[in-house]
Image (tube, grey):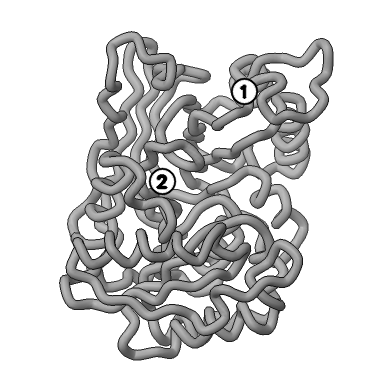
Amino acid sequence: MRKTVIKPKHLRKGDTVGIVAPASPPFDPGDIQFTIEWLAKLGLKYKLGKNIFNSYSDLAGTDAERLEDFHAMWADKEVSAVLPIRGGNGVCRLLPKIDFELIQRHPKLIVGYSDITGLVNPIHQKTGLVTFHGPMGGSFYKSSYSHYYFVKALMSNKPLGLIVDPIPPELWSPAYPPRIVIAEGRARGQLAGGCLTLLKQLMGTPYELETEGKILFIEDVGEEPHSIDRYLTQMLHAGILHKAKGIIVSEFVNCAPGDSGRMRLSLNHSLENVLRDRLGNLGIPVAYGLRFGHGRDQFTVPIGVMASLEVAKNKIKFKIEEPATV
């Protein structure tokens, strides 16, 4: 049975966005200026977390400092959306102390990917709030494709509808591989997923991803195919993949053998072969090569809304059917 879903209000011109760093800090303080300027082009105001420029190892301050900023934005009545500036590392450290009741009482938009996978899925599962896997404060403006779906997802109360790929700048551009059929079939269900590394990190915890009857989406960056094989094998043994109705896989940026810069195994499979081996015999549709996650072009995925997936020999059709906001 589907749990009660809470939908946040969509952004309107004049609304305020709270910019926080719950994981790693901005690469440079000046980077936030780009975010501020692009938010202004959308007619949006902003507030910065007071600890956003702090540094503690590779984190944007201590756990207490990052948590303070995060909770402050949810409690602030002027803030309509919580926008992490980047991913990196550290959000899973915060989970035991996050005030999920505060979030449920004050439903707002939150969007992010990479390490922020460790926030957007637990928040949805603990509160019912629709959250978003997509570009963050430091990246939503980096391509017209990313910007288009970011705005469509957060500043409209209409369904995102059929998701199409970006038009390649050149016909023979190697940066735009096609969508690839791993397993044919049809599926319909709520969306859940994100960065594979984080999904693995949440396994065996109170925040483990719930995949029963859902369309699972997975992505990652800078991982060797044999590492992805390990992650998927662990999820297979845990029964997580078998529960899903369908799976969509991103382009997996810099995940070809040797792309990570780490030592690769001499007999390493290609990523496509790993996906066919680990996901091709689940009896559910699986599509590879969609544009979400760590690539330059990425659509925004609303977690907790209904979507449909059709994977056939000559067609991959992914449609987000339900509005994610009110």
> Residue placed at 26% from the left, 25% from the top?
167
Q: Residues within 10 Å of mark 1 (few under 14, many from 20)?
A: many
| Residue 287 x, y percent position in the rendering | 46, 26
List the residue tagged with mark 2.
189
> Residue placed at 40% from the left, 76% from the top?
18
Q: Does residue 311 appear to the left or right of 148 in the view shown?
A: right
Q: Residues within 10 Å of mark 2 (few under 14, many from 20)?
A: many
Residue type for callout 2: Gly
Q: Is residue 302 visible?
A: yes
The C terminus sits in image quarter: bottom left
In three-dimensional space, the C-alpha distance between marks 2 and 1, rounded to whole angstroms, equals 21 Å
Depth check: 157 or 281 in front? 157
Give the secondary structure at mark 2. Answer: strand
Q: Does residue 141 appear to the left or right of 40 in the view shown?
A: right
Q: Does residue 315 appear to the left or right of 265 in the view shown?
A: left
Depth check: 103 or 125 in front? 103
| Residue 211 x, y percent position in the rendering | 57, 49
Q: Earlier in the sequence, mark 2 or mark 1?
A: 2
Viewer-side label of 2, 1? 1
**From what the image shows, is residue 69 above or below residue 275?**
below
> Residue placed at 47% from the left, 34% from the top?
248
| Residue 197 x, y percent position in the rendering | 68, 45
Which numbered tag is attached to residue 275?
1
> Residue placed at 65% from the left, 50% from the top?
199
Give the secondary structure at mark 1. Answer: helix
Depth check: 175 or 109 in front? 175
Q: Is residue 281 visible?
A: no
Image quadrant where residue 229 sits = top right
